[in-house]
Amino acid sequence: MTTGCNGGGTCHASTVAGNLKMGTPAETYTALIDVKAMGTNLNGMGTHCKDTDQVRVVPGDPDKSLFFHKVEADTPNCGLHMPPGSKLTPEQLTQIRTWIKNGAKND
């Protein structure tokens, strides 16, 4: 059984979840950086992220990055909290925030 963002068919191993495929590191980076949100809610409830005009990752600005809000907020302004059913550790959140703040480099 796989885990993480691309942990299964309804996760980001395909484009089912949020129209965001995260199969390989290169594919993931290309799909996140400076790309507008394209997701719709699978359950049909709440605001679709594609309707918010948000950008998945804005290099240098974690507060404007939808990706960071989805992993940090208990109730993001669109879609569901990620990962579903669990939370990242404070250390993981700091690592993501720092990566984005430092330009979200592909390294």
Image: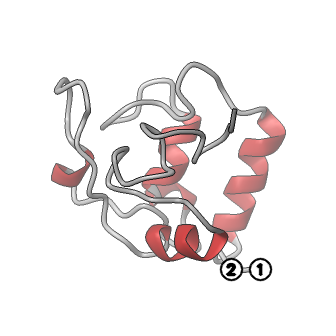
Q: Which residue is drawn at 64% across and 77% down?
A: 103
The x and y percentages for residue 30 are: 50, 77
Foreground: disc 1 or disc 2: 1
The x and y percentages for residue 26 are: 61, 77
Q: Which residue lies furthest to the right in this view?
A: 91
Image quadrant where residue 62 sits:
bottom right
The x and y percentages for residue 21 are: 45, 59
Q: Which residue is drawn at 72% across and 43% down?
A: 93
Return the mark for residue 27: none
Evaluate if marks 1 and 2 touch, with contact meaning CB atoms under 8 Å apart. yes
Q: Which of 2 and 55 is in front in this view?
A: 2
Question: Disc 1 to disc 2, how far (Cα)?
Answer: 6 Å
Q: In which quarter of the image is the N terminus?
A: top right
Residue of label 1: 107
As displayed, is residue 12 above or below residue 75?
Answer: below
Q: Residues within 10 Å of mark 2 (few under 14, many from 20)?
A: few
Q: How is the image coloured?
A: secondary structure
Q: Which of 90 and 43 is in front in this view?
A: 43
Q: How crowded is mark 1: few (under 14 residues within 10 Å), some or many (20 or more)?
A: few
Q: In this view, does 1 lie to the left or right of 75?
A: right
Q: Residue furthest top?
A: 85
Which residue type carries mark 2?
Lys
The x and y percentages for residue 16 are: 34, 46
Q: Quadrant of the C terminus?
A: bottom right
As displayed, is residue 47 above or below residue 25?
Answer: above
Q: Which of 60 and 18 is in front in this view?
A: 18
Residue of label 2: 105
Image quadrant where residue 28 sits:
bottom right
Say which element carries label 1.
Answer: loop
Q: Which of 2 and 50 is in front in this view?
A: 2
Q: In this view, does 16 lie to the left or right of 93?
A: left
Q: Residue at x 71, y 33 (%)?
A: 88
